[in-house]
């Protein structure tokens, strides 16, 4: 793939004589491509992660179109200036007008499995390590993409009960990564972790948006504290670490003492568990629920 950016960066800026080199010398090697049915959230993630302005659309090994930043702007915010520019009729060119495929909201397919992009939201410090790492590994083993989101960039300090454990690199910051770019949300526990998150307005809004968009959420141990702050447990049935039961009831929810609870009394599916001992059932259940909802 050869773009104007390639020519500018690899030829003009380096003073290369265009009469002495071929296109292969300046083109993008191994271009990132997408399929006609790829999800908008996945396309946005590729554009961001690879810092590209357009992506070729390939079907059965053949290029069938191109998605640009302008196309994404129209899909994301039809009132933006970039969207207005993108809707303008292109200049006439020999060979006809390039094809712009319609953006799809389907979940990305990887082989014969549905591949989901799943957000893991934690505070910069205080998450219970096993409640982060075990669900993360389960998501990875199932062929999905876990993304660590926090309220600050850098690294998250995990804990093993009251002792510091490992640190983990943050992939995105609330307020900068939109909830709509994810297919589902996992909220690990730890006493301090949700206590910090519920004091952060952007984190609370991030969580609330998954419910408003009808996207599945899984929370374990003390994590429902953040759900309470987002006012999304009213009328829902859930479990948690036992000390949260009064808070959940006061917020209008129904608390149950079960290893894992799936609640569909609301705009989305909500999966909750009580403690680290429930992690196996928690991971198996939320993956099954996420997969069912996303198909």
Image (tube, rainbow, N blue to C red):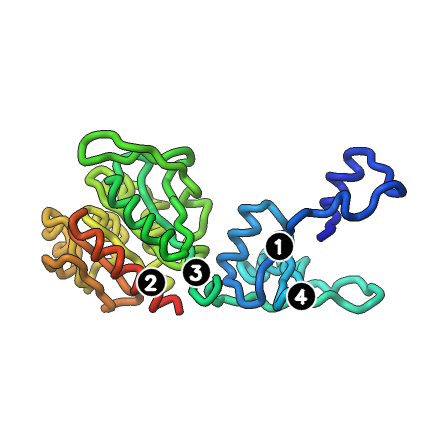
Secondary structure category for the residue under label 3? loop
From the top left corner, tell me how far across and down residue 258 is, in percent: 12, 59
Q: Of 25 and 244, which appears nearest the observer?
A: 25
**Earlier sequence position, callout 2 versus callout 4:** 4
Could you tell which of marks 2 and 3 lies nearer the N-terminus?
Answer: 3
Label drawn at residue 62: 4
Front: mark 1 or 3 = 3
Q: Position of residue 216 (x, y in %)?
A: 32, 61
- Looking at the image, which residue sits at the far right? 19
Counting other residues with Cα less than 10 Å from the Cα at mark 1, is it few (<14), some (14-19), or many (20 or more)?
some
Task: Say the numbered circle drawn on residue 290.
Answer: 2
**Res. 158 image quadrant:** top left
Percent from the top left, x then y, of residue 126?
A: 26, 36
Q: Which residue is mark 1?
A: 69
- Reading the image, the residue beneath label 3 is 115
Residue under the point 72% across and 45% down: 5
Q: Along the horizontal axis of the image, is 222 left or right of 39?
A: left
Instruction: Please state which of the two labelled residues, at mark 4 or mark 1, is closer to the viewer.
Output: 4
Q: Nearer the N terminus, badge 2 or badge 1?
A: 1
């Amino acid at each position: 793939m050869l773009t104007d950016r390639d020519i500018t960066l690899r030829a003009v800026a380096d003073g290369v004589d265009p009469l002495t080199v071929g296109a292969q010398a300046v083109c993008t090697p191994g271009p990132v491509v997408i399929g006609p049915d790829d999800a908008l959230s996945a396309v946005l993630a590729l554009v961001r992660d690879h810092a590209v302005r357009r992506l070729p659309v390939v079907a059965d090994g053949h290029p069938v179109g191109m998605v640009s930043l302008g196309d994404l702007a129209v899909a994301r915010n039809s009132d933006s200036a970039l969207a207005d520019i993108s809707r303008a009729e292109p200049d006439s060119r020999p060979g006809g007008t390039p094809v712009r495929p319609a953006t799809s909201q389907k979940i990305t397919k990887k082989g014969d499995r549905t591949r989901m992009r799943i957000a893991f939201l934690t505070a910069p410090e205080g998450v219970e390590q096993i409640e982060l790492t075990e669900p993360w590994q389960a998501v990875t083993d199932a062929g999905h993409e876990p993304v660590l989101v926090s309220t600050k960039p850098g690294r998250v300090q995990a804990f093993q009960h009251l002792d510091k454990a490992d640190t983990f690199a943050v992939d995105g910051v609330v307020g900068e990564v939109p909830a709509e770019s994810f297919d589902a949300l996992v909220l690990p526990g730890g006493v301090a972790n949700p206590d910090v998150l519920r004091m952060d307005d952007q984190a609370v809004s991030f969580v609330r948006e998954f419910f408003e968009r009808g996207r599945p959420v899984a929370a374990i141990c003390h994590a429902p504290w953040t759900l309470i702050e987002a006012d999304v447990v009213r009328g829902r049935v859930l479990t948690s670490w036992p000390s949260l039961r009064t808070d959940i009831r006061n917020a209008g929810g129904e608390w149950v003492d079960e290893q894992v609870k799936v609640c569909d009394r609301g705009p989305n599916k909500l999966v909750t568990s009580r403690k680290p001992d429930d992690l196996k059932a928690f991971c198996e259940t939320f993956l099954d629920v996420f997969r069912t909802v996303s198909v």
